[in-house]
Image (tube, rainbow, N blue to C red):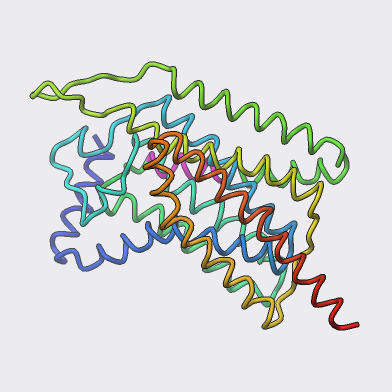
Amino acid sequence: MIDIQYLLLLQDFRNNINNALTPFMEWVSMFAVTYLILIPVFIYWNWDKKKGLYTLVSYYFCMLITPLVKLTACIYRPWIRDSRILPAGDSITTATGYSFPSGHTTTAAPLAGGTAVVAWDNKKGRWLSYIMIIFILLTAFSRNYLGVHTPQDVCVALIISALSLFFTSKLFKYLDAHPEMEDKLLLGTFIFCWIGIAYITLKPYPMDLDAAGNLIVDPQKMMNDGYGDIGKVMGFAVARFVEKKWINFKAIGMDAKSIVISIIGLIIMVLLKQYVSPVLTGAFGSHWGKLLFSVIYTFYYIALFPMVLKALNRNASAAGR
């Protein structure tokens, strides 16, 4: 098949250069799913709340669509389809779930793509748009280069991401004209998330066995990312409702003090992911632990830390009188 031949061609190239580019490609993939979200969160907190929300909502659409498609299609990874494929470096350990579409790409493309769109409006900030577009392409290519996704996996992921960005722009225009509809949409999203959880939990999965009689892919393990991704959307629905009703913060600006405060908040985000996520998965299991962490994590940067930012701004204003 052409897709496998393409991956084998990249594999031969990797071997011929002694995997010189492999660490960089692994870093690109890691940054996409670990640190890239910090950029739109910073925009949301500091520069422009609505622009940050545009990028984040585009991302949440992808987080809802990707696991439903992935756990419906149930397409095996390239090395399962063809034993000649040998993923590079440690990439096989982070390549969880089924193959189609690429979750790394549907994470990077809306986050970086949304940032590129909102930065483009500012002529001085267009350099960021170019960097974000390059990063999207690099992330997509890295998944092929590392041997963990086929071209169709990343191409469909890019299409899903582009549609999410487009649909979000239309949704925001609709809500500008009909703000009273937002609460209903948030409630509908929350309910749909639970339907999605029920679907991926109860649906049948392939139960193919290898030569030793073991499952080639354990569906229970494959659901983990689905619970985590859908949990992000649940967390947003709750956090956005709380923030809009009772917090209603404004972006705090780009002065040195505000940037330092937000950097502290972003460091807390990284620490939450590093230390709190393992605790919750250990206590509640990989499914519900991941879902609970995603809800907490999203609530933190959408509502909780903005509440802190608003309180700090209020105190600073009172001290300046």
Between 153 and 108, the one lying in front of the other is 108
Q: In the rendered view, does 234 fall on the left or right side of 315?
A: left
Question: What residue is shown at x 38% (from left), y 49% (from top)?
Answer: 278
Q: In the rendered view, does 209 fall on the left or right side of 99?
A: left
Q: In this rendering, is residue 83 above or below 111?
A: above
Q: In the rendered view, does 29 fall on the left or right side of 313?
A: left
Question: What residue is shown at x 62% (from left), y 66% (from top)?
Answer: 42
Residue 163 visible? The answer is no
Q: In this rendering, is residue 216 above or below 123?
A: above
Between 125 and 248, the one lying in front of the other is 248
Question: What residue is shown at x 27% (from left), y 28% (from top)?
Answer: 218
Residues in magenta, as a range = 152-163
Q: Give the percent coordinates (x, y) of residue 18.
A: 14, 65
Q: Give the percent coordinates (x, y) of residue 310.
A: 77, 65
Our reading of the magenta stretch's main secondary structure is: helix
Q: In this rendering, is residue 55 above or below 99?
A: below
Q: Quadrant of the C terminus?
A: bottom right
Residue 159 magenta-drawn? yes
Q: Give the percent coordinates (x, y) of residue 86.
A: 17, 47
Between 280 and 67, the one lying in front of the other is 280
Q: Residue furthest right?
A: 321
Q: In the rendered view, does 292 fall on the left or right side of 90?
A: right
Q: Give the percent coordinates (x, y) of residue 158.
A: 49, 45
Residue 82 magenta-drawn? no
Q: Residue furthest front?
A: 283
Q: Quadrant of the N terminus?
A: top left
Instruction: Count all numbered tags in the image, as a single digit.
Output: 0
Q: Quadrant of residue 37?
A: bottom right
Residue 173 visible? The answer is yes
